């Protein structure tokens, strides 16, 4: 996730301040610190959406991301 933040142009400090909010939003629990290659498609969607909504943007376009989410998410 830190690599994605760096690619998106965030400073290291900004990345570190956003991680707790992303972790809380995605509700991945202990899986949050596991390698992404072990994630299911739903977990990847949660993580991707969590990162996307953490960006301070005026407009956020979401296309079919929520199709793999569960009811509580």
Image (cartoon, rainbow, N blue to C red):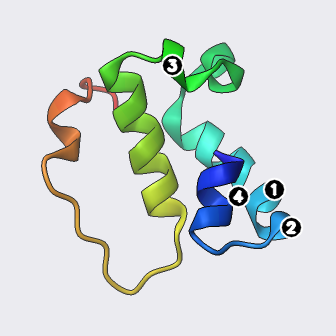
**5 lies left or right of 62:** right
Q: CA distance from mark 4 to mark 1?
A: 6 Å
Q: Are marks 4 and 1 in contact (CB under 8 Å)?
A: yes
Query: Which residue is labeled 1 in the image?
Result: 16
Q: Which residue is mark 2?
A: 13
Viewer-nearest of discs 2 and 3: 3
Which type of secondary structure does the marked residue at label 2 adopt?
Answer: helix
- The answer for how far apart the CA atoms under marks 2 and 3 are is 26 Å
Outermost residue on the right side: it is: 13
Q: Could you say whether the residue bearing mark 1 is in a helix, strand or loop?
A: helix
C-beta proximity under 8 Å, tags 1 and 3: no
Q: Residue at x 51, y 12 (%)?
A: 38
The mark lying in front, picked from 3 and 4, is: 3
Estimate the x, y position of residue 11 in percent, counting from the top left: 78, 72
Task: Indicate which disc, 4 or 2, sits on the residue closer to the N terminus.
Answer: 2
Label 1: few (<14), some (14–19) or many (≥20) C-alpha neighbours in 10 Å: few
Q: In 3D space, how far apart are the residues under numbered discs 2 and 1 (Cα atoms)?
A: 5 Å
Disc 4 designates what residue? Answer: 18
Mark 3 vs 4, N-terminal side: 4
Label 3 to label 4, Cα distance in Å?
22 Å
Give coordinates of residue 15: x percent, y percent. Answer: 74, 60
Instruction: Check contact, mark 2 vs mark 1: CB within 8 A.
Output: yes
Residue at (45% x, 61% y) in the render: 53
């Amino acid at each position: 996730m830190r690599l994605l933040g760096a690619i998106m142009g965030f400073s290291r400090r900004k990345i570190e301040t956003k991680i707790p909010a992303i972790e809380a939003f995605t509700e991945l629990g202990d899986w949050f610190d596991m390698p992404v290659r072990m994630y299911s498609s739903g977990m990847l969607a949660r993580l991707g959406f969590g990162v996307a909504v953490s960006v301070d943007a005026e407009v956020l376009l979401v296309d079919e991301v929520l199709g793999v989410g569960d009811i509580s998410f």
